[in-house]
Amino acid sequence: MRMIRRFSVLIALISAVALLAQGSAYAAPNAVAAAITGRGTIWPGLDVAAAPQSVNFGGTAVGTIVAVPGASAGVYSCSFSGSGFGSVAAGGGTVTGTCSGGTVGSGSITCVVTFVRVGVIVVIVISCGTSATGPTGSGSGNGQGAGVFLFAPDQATPPVTSYRLVGVAAGAGAA
């Protein structure tokens, strides 16, 4: 299990770097990159058979929001909710929410997140609106991106009604 975790974290970091490199290659004026951790709930809970679910997530992102000419960096509070369909083995769905805050400057993102989970691996695709205010000014824009997370259920046996997530996400776009 430990080797799977390390491999998954490595894949997540490689994915984030690849996304950032792709964004900079096109000179995108807006970008987001963050490491994210948090907890959530699933209702009525993941069981052996797949069923509709309500999903909530709250956590902390540590990263950067660039909305040219503005930029912010630091710690952001995140909150997302939505719905999905899944079982203990796999699932997917869509959540919407925001991350806001910052230690240097201030920034926020509002995103629609589509997720697919197989076992403990969650892959996300994001579409976000960004805004940032910092030492260089203020800006806003839109962008797309992706991320990879590790899913850790809090219950050892079904139904799984709470979980923890850790991973990285990054994206880029135009003003």
Image: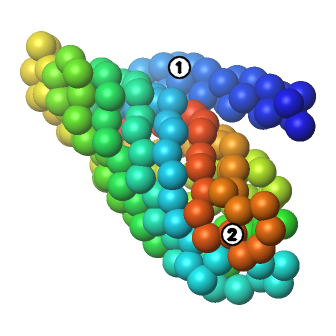
Q: Residue at x 36, y 55 (%)?
A: 79
Camera-side residue: 46 or 33? 46
Quarter placement of the N terminus: top right
Q: Which mark is residue 25?
A: 1
What's the CA distance linking mark 1 and mark 2? Answer: 42 Å
Q: Position of residue 171 (x, y in %)?
A: 48, 36
Q: Position of residue 134 (x, y in %)?
A: 14, 20
Q: Residue furthest top?
A: 135
Q: Position of residue 137 (x, y in %)?
A: 10, 21
Quarter placement of the C terminus: top left
Is 27 on the left-hand or right-hand side of 106? right
Residue 7 visible: yes
Q: How is the image coloured?
A: rainbow
Residue 172 visible: no
Q: Nearer the viewer, mark 1 or mark 2?
A: 2
Task: Indicate the secondary structure of the residue bearing disc 1.
Answer: helix
